[in-house]
Amino acid sequence: MKLATALPELTEHDVLAVPVGARGALPGWLGAADLDPEWIAGALADTGNGGKPGGITNLPVPGRRPRSLVAVGVGDATPAHVRSYVAIAVRRAQTLAEHGATRLVLPLPAGAGPELVRVAAEAALLAGHRFRQSSSPHPPRLQRVALVVPGAGPAAVDALHRGLVTAAAVTWARDLVATPPDTADPAWLAEAARARLAEHERVTTTVLGPRQLRAGGFGGLLAVGGGSDSPPRLVVAEHTPADAGGRHVVLVGKGITFDTGGISIKPTTGMRHMHTDMAGAAAVLAVVDAVARLGLPVRVTALAPLAENAVSGSAYRPGDVLTHVGGRTTEVRNTDAEGRLVLADALAHARLALGADVLVDVATLTGAARTALGARTGALYATDDDLAAGLLAAGGAAGEAWWRMPLAEEHVAHLRAQLDSPVADATNAPGNPGATTAALFLQPFAGSLPWAHLDIAGPARAAADHGETVKGGTGFAVRTLLRWLESGMLAR
């Protein structure tokens, strides 16, 4: 992607996007581009395109210079409206790539500042992203995007860089989630993380195998992964800046590379997408990758407990009592409530062994969160109001929707008894409301540290394209966490 300060010379291989503002407002540069504003306005009126976000009008171009003209609503040019404008233009241009288009010329609305440059860069790469594993040739794709921003200066260049790095991290997370489970077992995912993060001088990546996990007391992770021929792993990826002051943030991501449900086996319809159950691990690893590429002055560690929850003679059972890192015990009542068991070990390890100051976990944890909030909003639980506010603000800036769920004592006191077990400190299946009782199960492992739990069971996977999100793994939470780490709220 290139940043241009003026409309480039157009060729028969270009697709030109025209941002249509609220009430059909057209940009002032049309005449200079030898395009008739009155003719375009008439075409927009004929198609009912009044500039509302999501509106699109394909216009014929005499002489094919550019090859195609696509007028797209940009509304009031808010970040959300610009994301929609860019995503629609990119998708339209990609379809025209099969007919000879190679470049999308993408002017931003007048007055666009650095924030909109970043938003546009992220949206362009994310909307155009595809994952394919097919024997047939891939269809032609756009080769270039020219982002036109009159008067763009150094701040816009920096914003473009941040947007491209962010989008690259999200697409890496998406690719990890999309990789089929016959490839993406715990060992493969650990090695993929090690290889990617080895590019960064200030990132140290360690992978713990079964022997080290047994020595460290990871009873939950070992139990969940014990039924598979692919043993569990724990990836520890630490970014240490030159100035290591400030708080140590540890991000924990659930990494179930495939979830059969174990002995409490899932029905077929519930199992078919369970290679995406490692989306939390993919997200936190991608955040560390982006932090290193941006050179952020934050000390942040990603912990990715990786396991395949399988069915075999060595699988763990309902009725088992597991001992986690730090000694807390869990009675297993449902082997399909496995994610919280691996997160519990990782949270305790972060607190007791890594010296975490702030903990955030990310997990495709409960169907209850998806039922409550739908497929595009994540559930946010937090023990610290400042932490919650920071994450919500970051999500708003990133274009990722979160809803804070109640965790205050007056809301949850009556639920704590549901975790009681006659033989252990807690049970792993305390019942409804499932998203909240799962958070309550995890809370003791975070101790008294500021802790946030992000349940992304809904938005981690998309059933269809929408906005800059594509069908399949979405990389949800990467942009929120990166914006939060960029915000400077972690200084002492």
Image (tube, grey):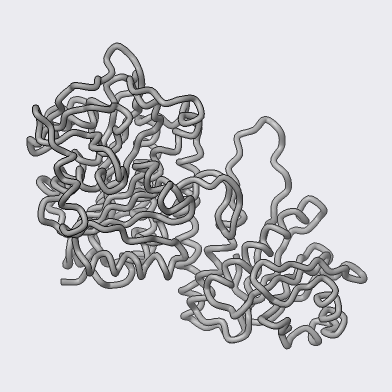
User: What residue is drawn where x is 27% and y is 72%?
Assistant: 488
Task: Look at the image and tell me in which quarter the C terminus lies.
Answer: bottom left
Q: Quadrant of residue 11?
A: bottom right
Residue at the front extreme, as displayed? 414
Which of 140 and 423 lies nearest the eye of the viewer? Answer: 423
Residue sitting at 16 percent across and 57 percent down? 409
* Residue 243 drawn at (x, y percent): 20, 67
| Whether residue 392 is visible | yes
Q: Is residue 302 visible?
A: no
Residue 234 is drawn in which quadrant? top left
- Point out residue 90 in the picture as x, y percentages from the top left corner: 67, 61
Depicted 98 relative to depicted 176: above or below = below
- Give the percent coordinates (x, y) of residue 183: 46, 28
Q: Is residue 334 or residue 66 the one in the foreground?
A: 334
Tell me where residue 448 appears, x and y as whole percent: 10, 55
Q: Is residue 23 above or below residue 272?
A: below
Q: How many marks?
A: 0
Q: Is residue 410 left or right of residue 308?
A: left
**What's the residue at 75%, 71% (across, down)?**
71
Of residues 155 and 106, the one nearer the viewer is 106
Rendered position, 331 above or below 108: above
Look at 45% across and 41% down and name the residue there. Answer: 176
